[in-house]
Amino acid sequence: VIGMIQQKIAQKERMEMCSLLAKEFDFALYTKDETEFDKRIDNRGYVDYVKEMPLVFSNSKINMNITLRSISTGIPLRCLDIMACGGFLMTNYQAELEEYFVDGQDLVIYTDFSDMKEKIAYYLSHEDERKYIAENGKKKIAEKFTYQVQLGNIIDIMENVE
């Protein structure tokens, strides 16, 4: 029950945030959810995550990740997917991101809604910097998140477990 409540709260927060962003920026959303959205949000419907979403990630100026509040640790897979496709990622803070990525070099982390809006405006008007960060993120994924590297990390951890 708690999980369902957290999910509903997160969904409501996300939609409020999307509506507020749509007041100031062109805002497209890809979802099969047919909930009534703010009319300023361009709901483009469902796209296949494997076949079409990589193109969405790589061709969007800014890809937003808003992690569910119930997820207190870990790197969201969506963040890795966006960067792997060469997309510019703006995300909320998760401590584990700092283990692999540098804010402002590989991705951009926002602290609150006001910070998010300021950074969106900034990066929309600084295309070269935005593209540079997206390319750095893609390179970092290619270096640190291959199956070979990650399996090596898992083996190292398992060898040290007593």
Image: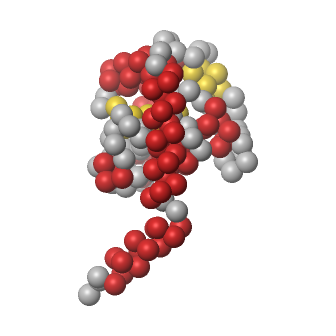
Residue 28 in the image, given as x and y percentages of width and height: 61, 25
Q: Which sits in the foreground, 23 or 151?
A: 151
Residue 73 in the image, given as x and y percentages of width and height: 33, 54
Please, is residue 3 above or below residue 102 in the view?
below
Farthest bottom residue in view:
162
Residue at the spot 43% in from the left edge and 16% down from the top edge: 121
Residue at the spot 66% in from the left edge and 42% down from the top edge: 53
Res. 122 visible in picture:
yes
Farthest top residue in view:
24
Residue 42 in the image, given as x and y percentages of width and height: 64, 22
Q: Where on the picture, by quarter, is residue 47?
A: top right
Q: Is residue 27 left or right of residue 116?
A: right
Please, is residue 87 above or below residue 113 in the view?
below
> Considering the image in quadrants, where does the C terminus appear?
bottom left
Please, is residue 23 above or below residue 16 in the view?
above
How are the colours assigned in the image? secondary structure
Task: Say how many tags the image has.
Answer: 0
Residue at the spot 29% in from the left edge and 83% down from the top edge: 161
Residue 94 in the image, given as x and y percentages of width and height: 33, 46
Q: Where on the picture, by quarter, is residue 87?
A: top right
Q: Which sits in the foreground, 16 or 145?
A: 145
Q: Is residue 105 left or right of residue 42?
A: left
Q: Where on the picture, by quarter, is residue 57?
A: top right
Residue at the spot 61% in from the left edge and 37% down from the top edge: 58
Res. 15 visible in picture:
no
